[in-house]
Image (cartoon, coloured by chain):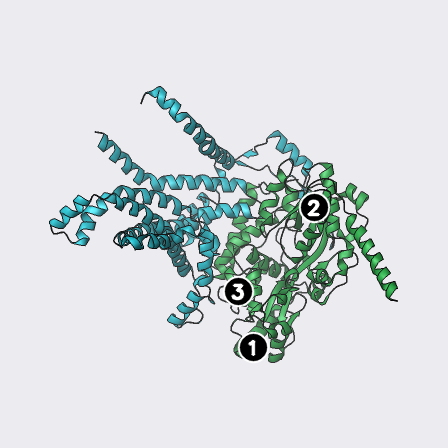
Chain colours: A cyan, B green
């Protein structure tokens, strides 16, 4: 394609990307480096139904003057990224010098919100993604070998977990694992410990959320792999059969290599999605046990006093996190692409 | 006689008709607020006004949408129904207007105690009071032969007896869900032990103190008698436990307690045994371990004067004294409106007000403290760290947030 043609062809997409992707990111980065002005406080007499009290309040006129002079707020550079709510540089270095062992260091690191969120997010991501791909492949192979009359029905039911709104699905499971719910009761019955509660135990809560994550996302992998299976050349399979390959060997040496680009695609999408794990935590009411970067953003914005700069800094860190996570896959894809070009 | 009744009824109808007709507005009114029975009543009555559209958006998530919805010009919401905690966020960002001129023009029916003035300007009109107080099962307490507890120590003793006698496994209820609820229970207990959240006259945190440690230890002791899932139980879930007959003692909001056993399917013994008393004290203190709240409405700053006036009229209609004649409305809350006669459901909140309960602090940085408490205390409740460590974390988290928001240098 000529450069000129390419330019006009790409222009609408490029403009949309600039407007809806680049500009919001610039705005978030800016927001994360500016904090609200220092509050001008004054003491006034407040009266209400319970009598009068002298209390502190924000002086609106003085604050407005400050805001008008510098509408963006005060420039704080990377301060917010390094404070306790985020990378907690000072706290981490103090922990490092005070800890006697690695174990103790990591134990206390989990006390800082960012590292606590990362420990759950990364565990969740790295356990769910391989399992989603594995289950997706299994379901796809199973469905593919069904009689064609049954396929439609089975595909519909296999897709249900993905059709259910994530927060609703999470809530349903949350009620089922309640100590008075059906699964919760069953587990108590099986373990013989009446005080056992899924929601009161951090490891069990993590396991519940991970199981939910797999249940919810496996259909996505299934649909992609099932579509891929339809393009599988019949002659290759037949050749393998003639060579005496077992079913397992056919899958191992013919089907999986054929689906490999799709595996890359699914892991890209799911790494990205699962790094931003959020609905599960809200739906399971699990903030005492598990948090994620997305949850921290939600919490910053949902308090009585909104912390926009803090939320913006966490958002930028999420973008960086996703980029780091995807880099191995992206580098591989790029190499494959270059390899093919030569 | 019959004729007289009919005539009186007729006159009454006409009078009430004119009363309802009296609310005639000329510009749009849009209300955002929390959703519990009393606020729904206010919203529904504001919507009776004619002449322009009155819309309401009553949701438990109101705090997340009221500020963004009032920062634009013109503001989406012309009125936010708020409490003494949530008015602060609206004050901090200067999105509500002083009401003095509108009160002079249209506010004849208001009681002086309903006016919330900040530095001389009336910023909100309060319509109800609220507090957390004891809700208990009188039949269960009779069975073990103890009086309703006046202190948290008594509550623990009663809970032990109920469990030991095999009446209930987890007799104590509490809205201890990690987050806002857990922080609020800490606030109650902390104030009950005589703590203050901030160093006098500054935004410096002051929760890592003896009162803080005592408060946490008491909460931990209470949690031993709660459903093991307590860190996921908000007020709704706690009420469900009470309704199901699993809980005999709990600290509950007055606004939710009044209608607690009117839900469908509540067993008869729960309905019969349901009783309310004032808030409890703790650690030998005389101030109850609770906080006083008011709920009221505001008028947005970034709307035209015409819209502000219409909003004021509609909201006045939502809290008009005539409503207090309805028994259902009277039980919904402890109204601050003229003509309100307390119902038995109100004794908890009244006892709270009379026994010197401290109002929830209306400080610009209290919201940040509440958030920090809600995030950091769950670790202690799960036994993952000491009370001192949890409170040190709260102070560190609060300090980081307060520096960002410019309250601390």
Marks 2 & 3 on one chain: yes
**Could you say where residue B81 lies in the image, as x and y percent from the top left?**
67, 49
Determine the CA span between mark 2 and mark 3: 38 Å
Q: Is residue B133 left or right of residue A173?
A: right
Which residue, given by chain and number where applicable, does mark 2 sit on?
A: B298
Near-viewer residue (A315 or B261): B261
Q: Which residue appears at 74% of the width and 61% of the height? A: B326
Near-viewer residue (B328 or B69): B328
**Could you say where residue B123 lies in the image, as x and y percent from the top left?**
72, 45
Determine the CA span between mark 3 and mark 1: 18 Å
Q: Nearer the viewer, mark 2 or mark 3?
A: 2
Quarter of image, res B235: bottom right
Which residue, given by chain and number where applicable, does mark 1 sit on?
A: B161
Q: Is residue B329 left or right of residue A168?
A: right
Whether residue B118 appears in this view of the structure is no
Q: How many marks?
A: 3
Whether residue B177 appears in this view of the structure is yes
Location of the N terminus of chain B (image quadrant)? bottom right
Mark 3 / mark 1, whichever is N-terminal? 1
Q: Is residue A75 above or below residue A282?
A: above
Which residue, given by chain and number where applicable, does mark 3 sit on?
A: B220
**Could you say where residue B128 lies in the image, as x and y percent from the top left?**
71, 56
Near-viewer residue (A159 or B218): A159
**Could you say where residue B60 lies in the image, as x and y percent from the top left?**
59, 52
Q: Is residue A339 above or below residue B383?
A: above
Discs 2, 1 touching: Cβ within 8 Å:
no
Q: Which residue appears at 59% of the width and 41% of the height? A: B68
Q: Is residue A276 left or right of residue B330?
A: left
């Amino acid at each position: 394609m000529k450069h000129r043609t390419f330019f006009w062809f790409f222009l609408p997409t490029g403009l949309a990307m600039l407007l809806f992707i680049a500009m919001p990111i610039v705005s978030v980065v800016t927001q994360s480096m500016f904090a609200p002005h220092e509050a001008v406080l004054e003491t006034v007499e407040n009266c209400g139904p319970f009598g009068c009290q002298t209390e502190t309040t924000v002086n609106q006129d003085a604050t407005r003057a400050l805001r008008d002079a510098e509408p963006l707020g005060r420039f704080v550079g990377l301060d917010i990224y390094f404070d306790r709510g985020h990378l907690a540089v000072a706290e981490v270095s103090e922990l490092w010098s005070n800890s006697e062992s690695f174990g103790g260091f990591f134990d206390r690191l989990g006390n800082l919100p960012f590292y606590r969120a990362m420990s759950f997010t990364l565990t969740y991501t790295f356990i769910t993604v391989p399992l989603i791909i594995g289950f997706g492949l299994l379901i796809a192979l199973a469905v593919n070998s069904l009689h064609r009359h049954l396929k439609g029905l089975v595909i519909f039911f296999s897709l249900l977990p993905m059709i259910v709104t994530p927060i609703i699905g999470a809530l349903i499971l949350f009620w089922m694992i309640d100590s008075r719910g059906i699964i919760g009761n069953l587990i108590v019955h099986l373990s013989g410990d009446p005080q056992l509660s899924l929601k009161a135990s951090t490891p069990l809560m993590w396991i519940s959320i991970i199981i939910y994550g797999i249940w919810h996302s496996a259909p996505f992998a299934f649909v992609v792999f099932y579509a891929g299976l339809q393009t599988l050349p019949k002659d290759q399979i037949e050749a393998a059969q003639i060579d005496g390959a077992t079913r397992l060997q056919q899958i191992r040496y013919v089907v999986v290599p054929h689906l490999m680009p799709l595996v890359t695609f699914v892991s890209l999408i799911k790494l990205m999605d699962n790094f931003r794990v959020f609905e599960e935590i809200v739906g399971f009411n699990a903030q005492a046990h598990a948090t994620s970067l997305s949850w921290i953003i939600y919490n910053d914005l949902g308090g009585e006093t909104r912390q926009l700069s803090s939320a913006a800094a966490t958002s930028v860190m999420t973008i960086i996190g996703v980029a780091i996570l995807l880099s191995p896959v992206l580098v591989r894809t790029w190499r494959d692409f270059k390899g093919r070009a030569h | 006689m019959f004729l007289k009744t009919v005539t009186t009824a007729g006159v009454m109808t006409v009078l009430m008709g004119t009363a309802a007709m009296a609310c005639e507005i000329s510009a749009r009114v849009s209300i955002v607020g929390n959703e519990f029975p009393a606020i729904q009543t206010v919203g529904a009555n504001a919507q009776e006004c004619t002449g322009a559209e009155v819309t309401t958006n009553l949701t438990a998530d109101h705090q997340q949408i009221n500020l963004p919805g009032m920062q634009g010009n013109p503001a989406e919401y012309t009125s936010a129904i708020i409490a003494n905690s949530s008015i602060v966020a609206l004050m901090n960002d200067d999105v509500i207007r002083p009401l003095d001129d509108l009160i002079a023009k249209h506010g004849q029916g208001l009681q002086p105690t309903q006016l919330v003035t900040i530095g001389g300007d009336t910023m909100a009109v309060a319509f109800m009071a609220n507090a957390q107080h004891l809700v208990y099962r009188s039949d269960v307490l009779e069975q073990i032969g103890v009086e309703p507890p006046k202190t948290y120590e008594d509550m623990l003793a009663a809970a032990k007896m109920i469990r030991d006698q095999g009446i209930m496994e987890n007799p104590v209820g509490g809205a201890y869900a990690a987050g806002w609820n857990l922080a609020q229970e800490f606030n109650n207990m902390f104030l009950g032990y005589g703590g203050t959240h901030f160093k006098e006259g500054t935004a410096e945190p002051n929760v890592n103190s003896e009162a803080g440690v005592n408060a946490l230890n008491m909460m931990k002791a209470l949690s031993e008698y709660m459903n093991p899932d307590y860190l996921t139980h908000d007020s709704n879930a706690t009420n469900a436990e009470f309704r199901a007959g699993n809980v005999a003692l709990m600290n509950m909001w007055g606004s939710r307690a009044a209608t607690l056993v009117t839900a469908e399917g509540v067993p008869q013994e729960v309905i019969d045994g349901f009783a309310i008393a004032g808030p409890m004290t703790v650690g030998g203190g005389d101030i109850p371990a609770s906080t006083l709240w008011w709920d009221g409405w505001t008028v947005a700053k970034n709307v035209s004067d015409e819209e502000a006036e219409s909003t004021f009229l509609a909201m006045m209609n939502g809290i008009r004294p005539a409503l207090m004649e309805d028994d259902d409305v009277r039980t919904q809350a402890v109204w601050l409106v003229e003509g309100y006669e307390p119902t038995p459901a109100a004794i908890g909140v009244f006892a709270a007000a009379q026994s010197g309960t401290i109002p929830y602090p209306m400080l610009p940085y209290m919201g940040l403290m509440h958030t920090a408490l809600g995030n950091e205390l769950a670790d202690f409740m799960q036994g993952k760290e000491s009370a001192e460590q949890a409170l040190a974390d709260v102070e560190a988290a609060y300090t980081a947030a307060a520096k960002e928001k410019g309250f601390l240098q």
